[in-house]
Image (cartoon, grey):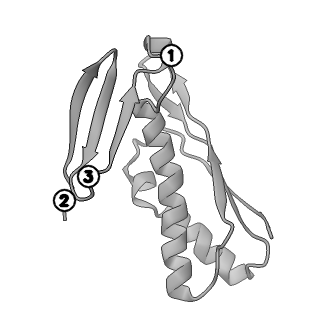
């Protein structure tokens, strides 16, 4: 299955993206260190956001299928750029999960999180680290 996303340059280093299936729109812009205003996600911000979102979504899918709850699960992700060559260098992600999960549920959640498609799609030189913390609830 494929999904089409179209983009239209708006000027001022901004691009409007449109999701073909839903019609949802969002605007990205160059980061401040490349002349952007810092008022929206940059393309590399979206990579970090996609990583965090994908990990949570994948865990939620597995939890639902296995019959355990991850209500209250949340995450925090950072994006650290490197300069030579300019690219994402490190994306540390902390996933907060319910403390009530059993050891077996924790293993399933962590395995699912590490198997998310975005994590698997990142270049091997990008340090996409995941820390799981059981402090929700």
Where is residue 123? Give x, y as percent. 39, 41
Q: Secondary structure at mark 1?
A: helix
Viewer-proximal residue among 12 and 70: 12
Q: Give the CA distance from mark 2 to mark 3.
A: 15 Å
Q: Give the CA distance from mark 2 to mark 1.
A: 32 Å
Q: In the rendered image of this protein, does residue 94 appear above or below residue 46?
A: below
Q: Secondary structure at mark 3?
A: loop
Earlier-in-chain disc, 1 versus 3 = 3
The residue under label 1 is 32
The residue under label 2 is 2
Classify residue 59 by image quadrant.
Answer: bottom right
- How many tags in the picture? 3
Question: Does residue 5 appear to the left or right of 88 in the view shown?
Answer: left
The residue under label 3 is 23
Q: Give the CA distance from mark 1 to mark 3.
A: 28 Å
Question: Does residue 133 appear to the left or right of 120 in the view shown?
Answer: right
Rendered-image quadrant of the N terminus: bottom left
Viewer-proximal residue among 59 and 13: 13
Earlier-in-chain disc, 2 versus 3 = 2
Residue at 63% in and 84% down: 68
Residue 86 visible in the displayed image:
yes
The disc at residue 67 is none
Number of residues whose C-alpha sits closer than 10 Å to that of mark 2, classed few (under 14), some (14–19) or many (20 or more): few
Q: Confirm or deny contact between disc 2 and disc 3 (CB under 8 A).
A: no
Residue 112 visible in the displayed image:
no
Residue at 47% in and 30% down: 40
- Residue with the most extreme top position: 35
């Amino acid at each position: 299955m494929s999904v089409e996303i179209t983009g239209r340059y708006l000027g001022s280093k901004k691009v409007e993206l449109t999701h073909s299936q839903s019609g949802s729109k969002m605007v990205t812009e160059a980061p401040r260190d490349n002349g952007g205003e810092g008022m929206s996600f940059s393309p590399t911000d979206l990579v970090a956001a996609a990583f965090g979102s994908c990990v949570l979504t994948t865990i939620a899918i597995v939890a639902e299928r296995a019959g355990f709850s991850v209500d209250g699960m949340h995450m925090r992700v950072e994006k650290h750029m490197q300069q030579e060559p300019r690219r994402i260098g490190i994306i540390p992600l902390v996933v907060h999960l319910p403390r009530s999960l059993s050891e077996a549920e924790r293993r399933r959640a962590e395995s699912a999180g590490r198997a998310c498609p975005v994590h698997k799609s990142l270049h091997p030189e990008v340090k996409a680290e995941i820390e799981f913390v059981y402090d929700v609830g």
